[in-house]
Amino acid sequence: MKPKLIVLLPAIALASFVPLLTAASPAPAAMAPAEGSALYRQRCIGCHSVEAGRNNPAGPNLAGIVGRQAAAGEFGYSPALRKSKFTWTRAKLDEFLAGPSSLVPGTRMVIGVSNAVERKAIIDYLASCKS
Ligand code: HEC
């Protein structure tokens, strides 16, 4: 009897612990608008300005990017992005940020954002930056 109990006890302890662990892993939650702007400042502002009319030599201005045609800013775009004739919707921006060269092979924008919650926060922030 005794050896069985010894084997069983850790199993019971584990079984009651596992649901606790899975319950603790958070579902992807939305981020506050301020976090989108903070992420933008960390990861994008080095190359992109969101102030209307202000140009950064390292990347096109992104003010009013949601709803704008791709490669329509004042910038020396890659032939690849110039050839892509789509409009930046939120869905397109999400796809681009998830993997820039998957959506536009040959693009010079190489910075991706792998986390979907962070992408959404950045896109929300961009949508608030009007041209
Ligand atoms: C190292 C510089 C650099 C960083 C950092 C960078 N980008 Fe870019 N981005 C570029 C360049 C260069 C292009 C133009 C790409 C081309 O011509 O193929 C571009 C293009 C874009 C475009 C398309 C613009 C248009 O007018 O069609 C979007 C949208 C964009 N970037 C978003 C972002 C976001 C959001 C971030 C931060 C997560 C970011 N970029 C970080 C350099 C950068």
Image (cartoon, rainbow, N blue to C red):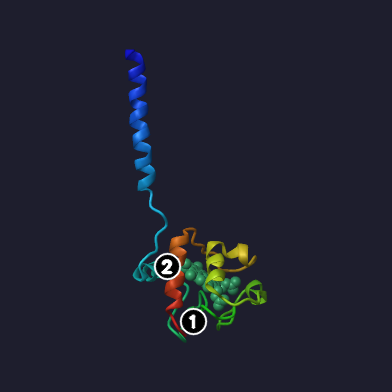
Q: Which residue is mark 2?
A: 121
Q: Secondary structure at mark 1?
A: loop
Residue at (46% x, 66% y) in the render: 120
Residue at (39% x, 44% y) in the render: 22
Q: Amino acid at mark 2?
A: Ala
Query: Which of the 4 image quarters holds residue 126?
Result: bottom left
Q: Is residue 80 above or below residue 18?
A: below
Q: Secondary structure at mark 2?
A: helix
Q: Which residue is mark 1?
A: 64
Q: Earlier in the sequence, mark 2 or mark 1?
A: 1
Closer to the camera in the image, 122 or 47: 122
Q: Is mark 1 within 8 Å of ligand 1?
A: no
68 displayed left or right of 11: right
Q: Amino acid at mark 1?
A: Gly
- The percent position of residue 41, horizontal first and vertical second, equals 39, 70
- Mark 2 neighbour density, 10 Å: few (under 14) some (14–19) many (20 or more): many
Closer to the camera in the image, 70 or 46: 70
Q: Is residue 14 above or below residue 54?
A: above
The reply to whether residue 45 is in sight is no
Dots 2, 1 in contact, CB < 8 A:
no
- The percent position of residue 34, horizontal first and vertical second, equals 34, 70
Q: Check the picture and name the quadrant holding the N terminus.
A: top left
Closer to the camera in the image, 50 or 93: 93
